Amino acid sequence: MTKRQTRIFFLGSTALFSLIFLALTVDTHQRIRTLTHSGEITPAVIAGKHVWHRKNCINCHTLLGEGAYYAPDLTKIAEQRGAPYLRSFLTDPSKFYNETRDRRLMPNLHLTPGEIDEVIAFLSWVGKIDNQGWPPRPILVSGAAIPGSDVGGAAPQAASDDPVAVGQALFRQTPPGCFACHSTAAGVNVVGPSLSGIAATAAARVTAADYTGKATDAAGYIRESILLPNASLAPGANYSANGVSLMPPGFEQSLQPAQLDALVAYLMTLK
Amino acid sequence: MRYRTQAVAYPYFVVALLLYGLQMVFGILSITKYLGPDPLMGLLPFDISKEIHTNVLIVWVLTGFMGATYWLVPEESRTELHSVRLAYLQLGLWTIAGVTAVVSYLFHWTEGNKLLEQPQPVKFAIVIVMLMFLYNVGMTIWKARRLTTTEGVLVAGLALAALLYLPALLTFDNYTLSIYYRWWTVHLWVEGVWEMIQGGLLAYLLIRLSGADREVMEKWLYVIVGLTFIAGILGTAHHYFWIGVPSYWLFIGGFFSALEPLAFLGMAIYAYTAMRRSGLAHPNRLALHWTIGSAIFSALGAGILGLAHTWPSVNKWTHGTMITAMHGHMAFFGAYVMIVLAMITYAAPGLFGHDQESTESPAGVWAFWLQMAGMFGMTMAFAAAGIGQTYLERILGLGYLETQHKIQVHFLMVLGTGTLFTLGVALYLYDFFFLAPKRRPAPAAWPPAPEAQG
């Protein structure tokens, strides 16, 4: 091989692969519209993207797995936690996490309510991008996808007296020990059904034709399911037998009314 | 120093090394925040310390590249530099732009786009500086009518680096598209044209340090940069895995990323064979260490550790974990930090007016080995953290916060080995700023004996 030949190898292969790359880029541009639902990029989504950049979110969090590794991935966060929770969290993160206990805390970014709604719109749009199904299983901020596997982690104590924060902590305390049977990750059903999206599920079930309980709204349905597990049975052969739910009874006695309210408030944020 | 104007490299190296020191400060700060709680959260939260850590790295490595080029081009083209004044002016503007970026981050002024956070005016200043630089180098070569392959590859790499910075000026409403083009700058820099720059500098150093035949070295240089681009251009696809682009990028990314170690392996073999022929005969043994170290560490960090997580079925689980930090640290250090330090170490005796005589100081040797050991340790600690995180958080489904709590011991290890590394950097700076200028050749060795001339 002479130097002239290796130079031709270098120039030729570089030109060839650059051309292939450019051709694929043109194709990607066309397919990206469907894959990212670009029709749904509303002014609010764009404004939310600006908030995302301006507040430097990417230098702690990852989005679509890209960014820094100091804080959780937010690709599916809007779907996982729903707008009411995120709105409340972003207004004051210290109400939900405690720096001494969790070692890390998101600084209060002092976002205006408008900015918060915009960033939620942006994150909701990101969550719907068709990205080959990543992440392969849900990435949770805290807790565990598999019930009972988070023993030894941060002690579940509420960071503030916000009902949602109290309810979230309560969910992982024993009693009532909800987390021992229920996960909050989508599709992870172990002993009891996953409570991911329970607020939406409850709202749908309460109006269903075969609903047998007395609740009239989603919160009422959740409350009823905790206190009277047999009032209406969750579909699935593993969750009830002979018309009796496998969920243990007796939470009427073991939960204070305020605790029950908090638990319902928390579960209502699982959209 | 064969040409007077090569001295321009000195202030570039000074700025580069001072920024290297600053990078360490923000690195240590950032890892400390992983241990939490963070008393500085209100003043200097993690996002800012990390942003400064990575941005200062890019700025100082580029400063080093520019200084190295100003050192190398007069020698290769056998002429004085076109304009010394322009080179100084360029450095001044570059430093102002760099410092402005860092200060603006401290005041939360950022574009919040990973690694390309520079505020828009700073971005324009960077483009202007690059143009000044390319003009100056281009005029030097044009006036001399002499362009060697080594400097051609180096300067082409720098020109392409400037060109590929332009996508960073674009903004898109679609987040997926903005990620898509962000990698044109970031990936095609570090796994494309910067590698070309590294190759050019490596060829120069190997020719000088081993006395290897230029024709042979330059012939293989073409092969190495050819391999770099075959793998590197379509290798961009490994950044397109889960961001909302068509699925064919998965296969392309997996396949071409698997080829990426070839170019680095090529560089390691290149360095090894050049050195095997001549042995470690050159008096500047430290420059030799940094040169060969760069070839080996980049093969390991960029080549092997990159390959470790670019296969789609692996990356699906490791994407966005500490595994990326493991690869990033060793790759950047091996490929770019070490090649710049090799150039500085090689040029230092000339810049201080005592050609390649008596250049090895205990401080310099310690600086080398402490950085080696520190970086190796950090990489291992990041790997342990990343494997733990992938298993607990991604596979078992444990929450992010609980996982971080459980892998905290590895962050402690990063802090420990990072401190060791920082000590090495401090020694390097001490050697360059305080010891090397005082090192004068012994009277008997001046003028150098003919056999000692490199």
Image (spheres, rainbow, N blue to C red):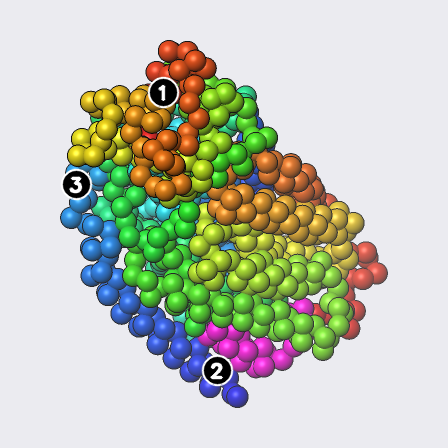
Structural crowding at the residue carrying mark 1, measured as other residues with C-alpha within 10 Å and reported as few (<14), some (14–19) or many (≥20):
some
Check if mark 3's residue and mark 2's residue have beta carbons within 8 Å: no
What residue is shown at x 22% (from left), y 39% (from top)? A45
What residue is shown at x 27% (from left), y 64% (from top)? A25
Q: Start and end of the magenta stretch?
A: B206-227
Residue nearer the viewer, B241 or B175: B241
Q: Earlier in the sequence, mark 3 or mark 1?
A: 3
Secondary structure category for the residue under label 1: helix
Q: Quadrant of residue A121?
A: top left
Label ID, residue A227: 1
Which of pointers 3 and 1 indicates the residue nearer the eye? 1
Where does label 3 land, which residue? A42
Q: Is residue B216 magenta?
A: yes
Chain bearing tag 1 is A
The amino acid at mark 1 is: Leu
State the quadrant of the C terminus of chain B: bottom right
Q: How many marks?
A: 3
Structural crowding at the residue carrying mark 2, measured as other residues with C-alpha within 10 Å and reported as few (<14), some (14–19) or many (≥20):
many
Q: Earlier in the sequence, mark 3 or mark 2?
A: 2
* Residue B237 located left or right of residue A104: left
Q: Is residue B42 magenta?
A: no
Residue A58: horizontal and vertical position, in percent? 39, 40
- How much space separates mark 3 and mark 1, taking CA atoms? 42 Å
* Residue A7 located left or right of residue A112: right
- How much space separates mark 1 and mark 2, taking CA atoms? 78 Å
* Residue A62 located left or right of residue B389: left
Where does label 2 land, which residue? A6
Task: Determine the main secondary structure of the stretch shown in magenta.
Answer: helix
Residue B100: horizontal and vertical position, in percent? 41, 36
Chain bearing tag 2 is A
Structural crowding at the residue carrying mark 3, measured as other residues with C-alpha within 10 Å and reported as few (<14), some (14–19) or many (≥20):
some
- How much space separates mark 3 and mark 2, taking CA atoms? 51 Å
